[in-house]
Amino acid sequence: MTAAFTIRLDDELMSKLDALAADTDRSRSWIAAKAIQDYVELNAWQIQRINEGIAEADRGEFASDAEVEAVFAKYRA
């Protein structure tokens, strides 16, 4: 099932969207839906990883001083 909703874009962004749609032979709607899908997936993944990190910290699962130093040493060289 799909649902429709309205968004407002300034004229410049709308022109860019229309140009991209024409250049890729896609509809304006398809490009907007794909952009929203990609944004939602990326941010959901990021928030999930943050929450996992918080849960690990709450359980006291931290890197040791030696592990942190090893990472810093790796990138110092």
Image (cartoon, grey):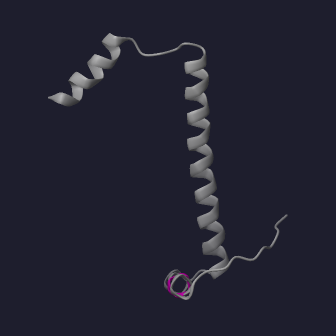
How many numbered markers are drawn?
0
Which residue is most to the left? 77
Q: Percent x, y for residue 74?
A: 22, 25
Residue in view at x 53 percent, y 81 percent = 13
Magenta-span inclusion, residue 37:
no
- Tell me the chief SS of the magenta region: helix
Q: Position of residue 10 (x, y in %)?
A: 57, 84
Residue drawn at 60 percent across, 18 percent down: 58
Q: Quadrant of the N terminus?
A: bottom right
Q: In the drawing, does residue 1 fall left or right of residue 62?
A: right
Measuring from the top left, give residue 9's x and y in whole percent: 61, 80
In the image, farthest residue toward the right: 1
Figure quadrant of the C terminus: top left
Q: Does the magenta portion include 17?
A: yes
Left or right, 8 with reference to 54: right
User: 36 or 12, which lies in front?
Assistant: 12
* Residue at the image point whose x is 67% and y is 79% from the top: 8
- Against 38, residue 16 (above or below) is below
Residue at 52 percent of width and 80 percent of height: 24
User: Is the residue 68 above or below the residue 33 in the image?
Assistant: above
Give percent across and percent down for residue 61: 52, 14
Start and end of the magenta stretch?
15-19
Query: Is 61 left, or right, of 69 in this rendering?
Result: right
In the displayed structure, 42 sits above or below 32; it is above
